[in-house]
Amino acid sequence: MERREEQPGAAGAGAAPALDFTVENVEKALHQLYYDPNIENKNLAQKWLMQAQVSPQAWHFSWQLLQPDKVPEIQYFGASALHIKISRYWSDIPTDQYESLKAQLFTQITHFASGSKIVLTRLCVALASLALSMMPDAWPCAVADMVRLFQAEDSPVDGQGRCLALLELLTVLPEEFQTSRLPQYRKGLVRASLAVECGAVFPLLEQLLQQPSSPSCVRQKVLKCFSSWVQLEVPLQDCEALIQAAFAALQDSELFDSSVEAIVNAISQPDAQRYVNTLLKLIPLVLGLQDQLRQAVQNGDMETSHGICRIAVALGENHSRALLDQVEHWQSFLALVNMIMFCTGIPGHYPVNETTSSLTLTFWYTLQDDILSFEAEKQAVYQQVYRPVYFQLVDVLLHKAQFPSDEEYGFWSSDEKEQFRIYRVDISDTLMYVYEMLGAELLSNLYEKLGRLLTSSEEPYSWQHTEALLYGFQSIAETIDVNYSDVVPGLIGLIPRISISNVQLADTVMFTIGALSEWLADHPVMINSVLPLVLHALGNPELSVSSVSTLKKICRECKYDLPPYAANIVAVSQDVLMKQIHKTSQCMWLMQALGFLLSALQVEEILKNLHSLISPYIQQLEKLAEEIPNPSNKLAIVHILGLLSNLFTTLDVSHHEDDHEGSELRKLPVPQGPNPVVVVLQQVFQLIQKVLSKWLNDAQVVEAVCAIFEKSVKTLLDDFAPMVPQLCEMLGRMYSTIPQASALDLTRQLVHIFAHEPAHFPPIEALFLLVTSVTLTLFQQGSEAEARFVPV
């Protein structure tokens, strides 16, 4: 019994009854989908057409929609409906109709071989799906039959049309297999059957590709077909002849892209590493492309150089271990490695003049991993061969990391600058990884180059060269422990000699100092060599991120050695904060830096510095608390509260077990009297309550208030105790008036830290009971109460 479906009323004034999936109604719905300007009508038509495609009537209307007098859009829908019925509802087709369905599809494909290409492709996909459902039992030689039927001379279609239709069918067959919904056990059977059927496909492809009379369109289709079939994990040795033909086709500009795709797909099969002899035969073919590669680079032909690089990298990256194992062929593999090195160092600036070099970076990781995975004796041999290669790689990468001239860089778009930034990060990661292979000698190498550059009087050096060498140091020092390196003292000594006249160079100088902050903690005598540079840079808004993050690292790592510089650091920081030089996030980092710095001072010094540092903000907050709430003063309030919470995040006068290594050997300040953070919080508590009274219904302000206390609690732990009673009382009032998520989070922190303390149990208990009661009431009231709950 046929299923009846609803058709949208939007199918037009003359639409047929909604229940009929007839040819006429389908055509009206398609017209509506493509040409009705009303988007709602389009959506209704699309929904109805999707129902039509899966209806039993689709078997009837699909063939009628393929009639020669229909437009391609209608024919395409008919072919798509057939594919959906075959691929998704195969079990509905009686077995005695398989052959007639197959014959009808062949007839339609033959007809469309000289018609619309999009309809032809869809019909080929439908026949491919039918073949996969019938293989191997109901149609054991499916592919061979396809080849034979399309080679028949009695066809009304010309030879080239039949050939292209056959190639299209053979191309979509493996693709349909990859996306098919076959059960797992059937997939294995069909895959095995297709592997056997290669014997009917590859000789045909070889013949067409090597035949001089084959037109370019046929040869291109052959390469695409081959590319599709190799993804079925065909044994690499069975592909040899076609791969060689594809290499030959690289000389034809029209076939170049398709040839590259086919070769890369064939080489990149996971199973290909088993066929070492075939891989060894491929190396000379790849090396034979070097002249074409150099010519392309010389002519600025980025597409050709990119394609050849893809081939070289595919062979090297996927099979370096297998090829390294062939010790007697080490020279040919080294030649391939040098070819990839050429691709890494391809002339021009990425991504404006070239886009090839980035393809090679993963290869160098893979090669290094494979070399270091060998047993000691074999590893030593390959280290001897490849250490010079990796030193050369470092030089190449640092050259590629260099900025262009200021004039040229000025013409780059923001997107190009961002791509270049990411590219430099990738280079940085590669340099850090290469350190494992080259070790301390790499740092010595960089230091010698930088020293020669800065001390040579023979020729002026470019800031780009200096910046790139420093960038190399920074890349390694950020992640590798350089505390025992004997070149870092010299590097610290060289940094003040750098003539900084450029923002990019200044940024890298800052980040390099930041990367060496742990080293400075172990060698505090050198702090004075670089700290003035950092403090000077704080005043430059263009160096905001690098200077502030570097000061924060120094204050965190070297805080016990900074008291002699504390007054200067606070004064400079206060000055740039008052001048509003930095964006909000950098202001927050700067307050965190000052928190680390003040933590190492005597309590009275801390209080004195806190007074001068935050008094201007407290005065500003007092004025804002008097004003009528508006968006402008809200931003100012949230900013000031954020500054305080970030300061209190890192200001901790107690010395926990995880403090700086060796700190027990230093003379540490002994806290006297109440905690400085608690003293400040008690002083500003009434002011904060006043702010809350006006802004209690604003989630952002309430969150900023709660953040001050939450971060202080996390940092101070038990030292926060004097604040517990009054904070619990304030939280209770807040939550009773307008329940907010940030207040719940702060309550959770207080309960977690203080509920076990008998002295603090009464206020904690009272707050917990109140919060629980209010929350349960909210839940009971349901959606009506949700309107009162202000989300964060």
Image (cartoon, grey):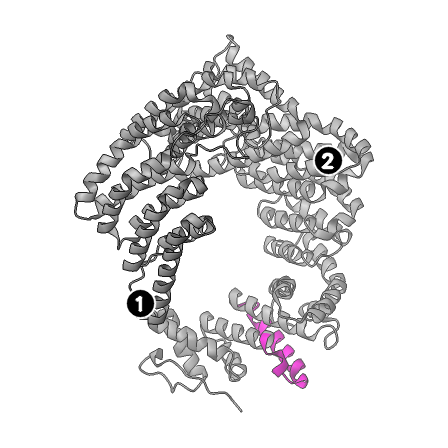
Q: In this view, does 122 lie above or below 59?
A: above
Instruction: Name the quadrant containing residue 540.
Output: top left
Disc 2, SS: helix
Q: Position of 526 compared to 314: left or right?
A: left
Residue 100 included in the magenta stretch of the image: yes
Is any part of residue 275 visible from this angle? yes
Q: Quadrant of the C terminus?
A: bottom left
Residue 518 in percent (x, y) is at 53, 27
Quarter occupied by residue 341: top right
Query: Where is residue 589 drawn, in percent x and y?
Result: 39, 35
What residue is shown with label 2?
372
The amino acid marked with disc number 1 is Ala
- Give the residue drawn at x 78%, y 51%: 237
Choose between 643 and 671: the one closer to the eye.
Answer: 671
Task: Name the residue located 59 percent from the left edge and 78 percent from the top edge.
Answer: 89
Evaluate whether residue 643 shows in this view.
no
The magenta region covers 88-116
Residue under the image location 62 percent in, 50 percent down? 261
Give 791 or 399, whichever is nearer the viewer.
791
Location of residue 730 in the rendering, given as x and y in whole percent from the top left corner? 30, 51
- Callout 2 amino acid: Leu
The residue where tag 1 is placed is 785
Residue closest to the eye, 546 or 95: 546
